[in-house]
Image (cartoon, rainbow, N blue to C red):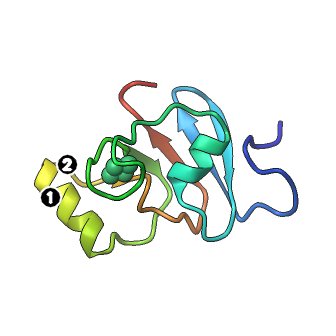
Amino acid sequence: MSPAGYPGGMASVVVRCEPLGVEVAVAPGQTLLAALRAAGVPIGAACDGDGICARCGLRVLAGDAPPPEAAEARALAREGFKAGVRLACCVRPTEDLVVRAAYW
Ligand code: FES
C-alpha cells in the first residue's frame, strides 16, 4: 500500500503512525503536522502550527528526526516532555520515522 497524503512524485520519507498503522509520505521540507493533516490523520494543533501549544507532541519510536531548533526545544522543556517527544509542527523529517500519539 502506498503512503497517504502525497499526491504524486517521489516522497522523500515515510512516517508510520502507530498504533493506527497508517503510513504518511512527507514531502521534502514539509512539516510532519502538514503531512499528517494532508493524510487525514487526527493531530492536536491548538496554535495551528506556531510551535506554542505543544498539542502536536508525538513520541518518536524509531528513526531520527533532525534536532529541535530553539523554539521547539523551549516548548518541549516548558511542557516537561521527556526525551523522544517532538512537536509535529516543528519537525521536517529527513528519514523514515515511526511515531505515536497517546490518542491514536
Ligand atoms: S501545533 Fe501548536 S505547538 Fe505544534
- Nearest the eye: 10 or 97: 10
> Mark 2, residues whose alpha carbon is within 10 Å: few (<14), some, or many (≥20)?
some
> Mark 1, residues whose alpha carbon is within 10 Å: few (<14), some, or many (≥20)?
few
Corner quadrant of residue 70:
bottom left
Q: Is mark 2 within 8 Å of ligand 1?
A: no
Circle 2 residue? 81
Q: What quarter of the picture does the N terminus occupy?
A: top right
* Residue type, label 1: Ala
Task: Tell me the distance, in whole angstroms, between the alpha carbons under discs 1 and 2.
Answer: 6 Å
Q: Position of residue 24 (x, y in %)?
A: 66, 45
Q: Position of residue 104 (x, y in %)?
A: 46, 25
Helix, strand or loop at mark 2: loop
**CB within 8 Å, label 1 to label 2:** yes
Q: Which residue lies at the image location 39% right of the left edge and 24% below the top edge?
A: 103
Helix, strand or loop at mark 1: helix
Q: Is residue 36 above or below residue 31?
A: above
Q: Can residue 85 be seen here?
A: no
Q: Position of residue 32 (x, y in %)?
A: 53, 54
Circle 1 residue? 77
Q: Which residue lies at the image location 50% right of the left edge and 58% below the top edge?
A: 63
Q: Is residue 16 above or below residue 6?
A: above
Q: Which residue lies at the image location 20% right of the left edge and 49% below the top edge?
A: 82
**Residue 100 in the figure: left or right of residue 35:** left
Q: Is residue 6 above or below residue 91?
A: above
**Residue 51 in the figure: left or right of residue 37:** left
Q: Position of residue 31 (x, y in %)?
A: 53, 60
* Residue type, label 2: Phe
- Nearest the eye: 24 or 48: 48
In the image, which disc is placed on residue 19? none
Q: Is mark 1 within 8 Å of ligand 1?
A: no
**Residue 61 in the figure: left or right of residue 54:** right
